[in-house]
């Protein structure tokens, strides 16, 4: 299996960060850092230079939209995929307009999330990103 490199997982809920990290590791993708809010995410991005940021939409203090804006200001080429458990079409569209590559529903079953993660990783980085499972 091909690995894309480093991923930053940002979510205000520790169990979601851990869950997403485990899923990423199951498909040979390195989680370089985790952040509990937008401020931590911006610091981690500057420090670790991840290849991909998985960013929660709804967080206290600095929400996902504000964090996305700042990440794109710092690095217009950064790859960001939004994480959400809410289906709010307006928010999703705003994230895409701000430069997010896509979004994932984090309330899907783990098997479905793995499939979606592989698809997004392939679209974002490498059309040959496939599992050998």
Image (cartoon, rainbow, N blue to C red):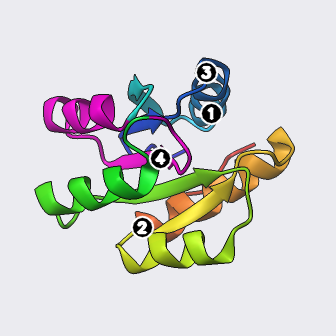
User: Badge 2 local density, few (<14 within 10 Å), some, or many (20+)?
Assistant: many
Q: SS at mark 3?
A: helix
Which one is earlier in the sequence, the residue at label 1 or at label 2?
A: 1
Image position, residue 39 (x, y; %): 28, 33
Q: SS at mark 1?
A: helix
In the rendered view, would you say 103 is above or below 96?
above
Quadrant of the rendering where the C terminus is positioned: top right
Say whether residue 126 is visible: no
Of badges 1 and 2, nearer the viewer stands 2
Q: Is residue 99 magenta?
A: no
* Residue where numbered disc 4 is placed: 55
User: Badge 3 local density, few (<14 within 10 Å), some, or many (20+)?
Assistant: some
The residue nearer to you, when weighing 109 against 68, is 68
Which range is magenta?
38-60
Image position, residue 127 (x, y; %): 50, 70
The residue nearer to you, when weighing 76 against 51, is 76
Say whether residue 81 is visible: yes
User: Circles 2 and 4: CB distance less than 8 Å?
Assistant: yes
Q: CA distance from mark 2 to mark 3?
A: 22 Å
User: Badge 4 local density, few (<14 within 10 Å), some, or many (20+)?
Assistant: many
Which one is earlier in the sequence, the residue at label 1 or at label 4?
A: 1
In the rendered view, would you say 23 is above or below 1?
above
Residue at left 53%, top 51%?
57
* Residue where numbered disc 2 is placed: 100
* Residue where numbered disc 1 is placed: 20
* Residue where numbered disc 3 is placed: 18
Q: CA distance from mark 3 to mark 1?
A: 6 Å
Q: Which dot marks residue 107?
A: none
In the rendered view, would you say 83 is above or below 26?
below
Q: SS at mark 4?
A: strand
């Amino acid at each position: 299996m091909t690995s894309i490199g480093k991923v930053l997982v940002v979510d205000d809920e520790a169990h979601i960060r851990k869950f997403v990290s485990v899923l990423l590791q199951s498909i040979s993708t390195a989680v370089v850092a985790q952040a509990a809010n937008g401020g931590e995410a911006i610091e981690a991005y500057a420090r670790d230079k991840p290849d991909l940021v998985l960013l929660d939409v709804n967080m206290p203090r600095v929400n996902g939209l504000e964090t996305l804006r700042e990440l794109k200001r710092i690095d217009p080429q950064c790859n960001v995929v939004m994480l959400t458990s809410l289906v709010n079409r307006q928010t999703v569209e705003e994230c895409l307009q701000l430069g997010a590559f896509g979004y994932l529903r984090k309330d899907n079953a783990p098997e479905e999330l793995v499939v979606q993660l592989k698809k997004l990783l392939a679209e974002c980085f490498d059309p040959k990103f496939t599992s050998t499972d």
